[in-house]
Amino acid sequence: MANAFLSIERLTQKYPDGKGGQFTVFENASFGIEKGEFVCILGHSGCGKSTIMNILAGLSEPTSGVVKMDGQQISGPSLDRGVVFQNYSLLPWLSALKNVTFGVAARFPDWTKQQVEDHSIAFLDKVGLSGDAIHRKPSQLSGGMRQRVSIARAFANEPKLLLLDEPFGALDALTRGTIQEELLKVWSGTDQTVFMITHDIDEAILLADRILLMTNGPLARVAESVEITIPRPRVRTDIVENPNYYAIRNHLVQFLGKRSAELAGQPSEGGETHSPETIRIDKTGGEVSAAPLLQAVKT
């Protein structure tokens, strides 16, 4: 795990409980993510998913534990880590294009203005935005178009790690499906590592190489790492025909509906590190435990 591209080691987050004690959100969580891997994390509200993402983004500090990327400890925000939020987080006074060029110019300060613009337009085009739309301000765009700008901005900056915080949560089902497919197309042409929070099981199966499952909080932990044994490229309308699809889906539903509560609130003993058990589900629904860290399956 220490040799992974992104290494989360013994991460713990506690807050004052207002009674002189402490409230432990999660404790001694440890897992790794390989370079180029797309990992989703699932869990009920209150288990600490967003807290983990904020720590990875450098927006908050854990109570204890270490996060390393490329062998270096993460400390504070960095252009090497990009974030796509659920609420778009676009600058309202700038056009869609200028929202992207703003970040690209900071990322590549030696580029000419034309290079920055051409690069930004190319990524907007990859997410389905072109023509007059790229010159409109966010208030003149639909929710789906705003999220396209957000995704284009994040990928255009070419971060080593891309963090997605429920980026499709506010979209209708049809728009969400379209942008999911565009996200996969853009990601498949890069070597970027992605860590994504979602509450949508089907979305996680479509997008991820692996899904991390968290128990309920408090004292939450990353209990399982489920490998998605469905080959890429994946298409929403086709993956349901894969023999592994429903076996994987049923396992996730059972964990979130039952086992996440059964495993909740179990404190570590003697500082024990909570490393997730790796689950690989074959076409018959059988489970095979493996090492805690899987290699990427991106093809």
Image: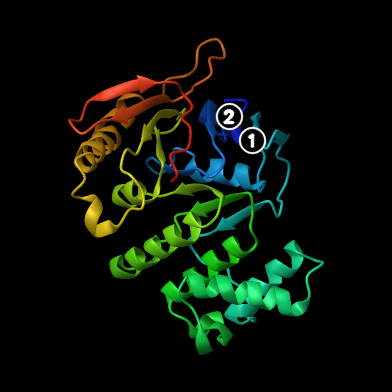
Q: Is residue 174 left or right of residue 4?
A: left
Q: CA distance from mark 1 to mark 2?
A: 6 Å
* Place of residue 256 in the rendered image (x, y in percent of width and height, measured from the top left): 30, 37
Residue drawn at point x = 25 percent, y = 39 percent: 253
Element on which disc 2 rests: strand
Q: Answer yes or no: do the residues labelled 1 and 2 have beta carbons within 8 Å?
A: yes
Kindly give the residue lying farthest to the front in the view shown.
Answer: 299
Q: Nearer the viewer, residue 214 or 252?
A: 252
Colouring style: rainbow
Q: Quadrant of the N terminus?
A: top right
Does 285 appear above or below 91? above
Q: Nearer the viewer, residue 23 or 59?
A: 59
* Place of residue 76 in the rendered image (x, y in percent of width and height, measured from the top left): 73, 46
Does 121 appear above or below 68? below
* Place of residue 111 in the rendered image (x, y in percent of width and height, measured from the top left): 78, 70
Instruction: Specify which label sits upstream in the sequence, 1 or 2.
Output: 2
Residue drawn at point x = 30 percent, y = 43 percent: 230
Q: Which label belongs to residue 16? A: none
Whether residue 20 can be seen here: no
Q: Amino acid at mark 2?
A: Thr
Does 257 appear above or below 110? above
* Residue named by callout 1: 62
* Residue named by callout 2: 12
Element on which disc 1 rests: loop
Q: Amino acid at mark 1?
A: Pro
Residue drawn at point x = 59 percent, y = 62 percent: 154
Residue drawn at point x = 52 percent, y = 89 percent: 132
Q: Is residue 121 left or right of residue 225?
A: right
Whether residue 254 can be seen here: yes
Kindly give the residue lying farthest to the bottom in the view shown.
Answer: 132
* Place of residue 128 in the rendered image (x, y in percent of width and height, measured from the top left): 45, 75
Kindly give the residue lying farthest to the top in the view shown.
Answer: 270
